[in-house]
Image (cartoon, grey):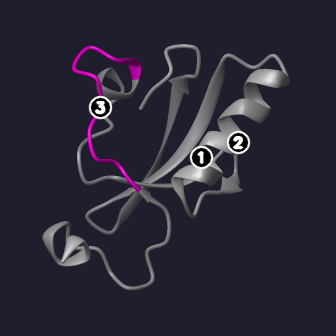
Amino acid sequence: AVRQKHRLGKSVKGVLVAGTEKNGDAAKKGVKLGDVILEIDRLPVKSTADFDKWRVISLERGESSALLRIERDNEQFFVVIDLIAGEP
């Protein structure tokens, strides 16, 4: 049902964006409801646990931002988001 609603192919593997903070960094950078996060800092993300794990690792390394690879409508693109803000 979720795949159909967001028009996701069976091969899409990642974390579905359920929402962003209205004035948060991810929203300002164009991340939208229904986007799929495929990677954070070029590491595959297959679950929210993966996303949270890579976010913590990046913060522990002293990084304040992360590169996300996102898929929307069968197109992929990259976005750099602020990790300190605590979202997308």
- The residue drawn where x is 22% and y is 20% is 22
Quarter the N terminus occupies: bottom left
Rendered view: 51 above or below 10: above
Question: Can you give x and y, in whole percent of width and height, for residue 4 in the image?
Answer: 17, 78
- Say whether residue 11 is left or right of residue 7: right
Q: Are marks 1 and 2 in contact (CB under 8 Å)?
A: yes
Question: What residue type is disc 1 on?
Answer: Phe
- What mark, if any, has residue 20 been given in the picture? 3
Q: Which residue is mark 2?
A: 54
Q: Which residue is mark 1?
A: 51
Q: State the separation of the CA atoms marked 3 and 1.
A: 15 Å
Q: State the separation of the CA atoms marked 2 and 3.
A: 19 Å
Over which residues does the magenta segment extend? 16-25
Rendered view: 77 above or below 66: below
Quadrant in the rendering for residue 2: bottom left
Dot 1 falls on a residue whose secondary structure is helix
Q: Earlier in the sequence, mark 3 or mark 1?
A: 3
Q: Are marks 2 and 3 in contact (CB under 8 Å)?
A: no
Question: What residue type is disc 2 on?
Answer: Trp
- Say whether residue 49 is left or right of residue 32: right
- The residue drawn where x is 33% and y is 37% is 31
- The residue drawn where x is 49% and y is 71% is 13
Question: What residue type is disc 3 on?
Answer: Thr
- What mark, if any, has residue 15 been given in the picture? none
Dot 2 falls on a residue whose secondary structure is helix
Viewer-nearest residue: 52 or 27 = 52
- Dot 2, how many residues are within 10 Å of its Cα: few (below 14), some (14-19), or many (20+)? some
Q: Main secondary structure of the magenta part?
A: loop
Question: Can you give x and y, in whole percent of width and height, for residue 32 in the image?
Answer: 26, 41
- Dot 1, how many residues are within 10 Å of its Cα: few (below 14), some (14-19), or many (20+)? many
